[in-house]
Image (cartoon, rainbow, N blue to C red):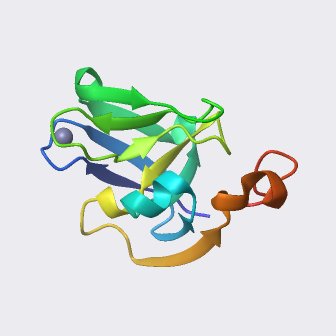
């Protein structure tokens, strides 16, 4: 699997990042309480493949329920461009909607049943995300 560098960020441009991922990405749409409201598309990568370029000082952390997921959003424009997911506390979930145009060749979208987390993922995380 060849990895390329995608760039992305929040709406106001304070938060900018790079992520190493294939040119043809597989992302997940989740139906949980927070993802369904934001329309978040998850591109989950190991944390070594994510680099925050700027905007650390603008990020605000929101947590709820188990507190394991760290929902990070820009305190200026409100956009959640990446965060630390409950399913992969050792990884990063990038919002595929926040990637810059020009590097993603193709995108397929799968479904994650986050609304029924305990029932759907008794082992604590999806078998593949
Ligand atoms: Zn912003």
Question: Residue, x 83% and y 58% (percent of image)?
Answer: 119
Residue 8 in picture, x, y percent from top left = 29, 51
x 55%, y 62%: residue? 2
Q: Which residue is situated farthest in the left direction here?
A: 12
Q: Is residue 88 above or below residue 101?
A: above
Is 124 situated left or right of 82 in this image? right
Residue that sits furthest to the top in the current view: 57
Q: Ligand 1, what quadrant? A: top left
Q: Quadrant of the C terminus?
A: bottom right
Q: Residue shown at 15%/35% (left/top)?
A: 76
Residue 54, placed above or below residue 30: above
Q: Which residue is depicted at the point 57% across and 48% down? A: 45
Q: Position of residue 51 (x, y in %)?
A: 40, 35
- Height in image: 12 above or below 115? above
Foreground pick, 128 / 39: 39
Image coordinates for residue 99, horizontal then vertical, percent: 31, 58
Is any part of residue 26 visible from this angle?
yes
Q: Is residue 129 visible?
A: no
């Amino acid at each position: 699997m060849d990895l390329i560098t995608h760039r992305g960020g929040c709406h106001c441009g304070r938060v900018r990042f790079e992520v190493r991922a294939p040119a043809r990405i597989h992302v997940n749409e989740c139906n949980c309480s927070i993802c369904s409201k934001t329309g978040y598309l998850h591109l989950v990568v190991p944390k070594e493949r994510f680099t925050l370029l700027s905007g650390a000082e603008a990020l605000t952390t929101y947590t709820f329920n188990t507190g394991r997921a760290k929902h990070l959003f820009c305190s200026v424009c409100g956009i959640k461009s990446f965060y630390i997911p409950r399913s992969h506390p050792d990884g990063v979930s990038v919002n595929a909607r926040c990637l810059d145009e020009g590097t993603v060749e193709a995108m397929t979208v799968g479904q994650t049943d986050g609304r029924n987390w305990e029932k759907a993922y008794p082992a604590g995380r999806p078998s593949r995300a």
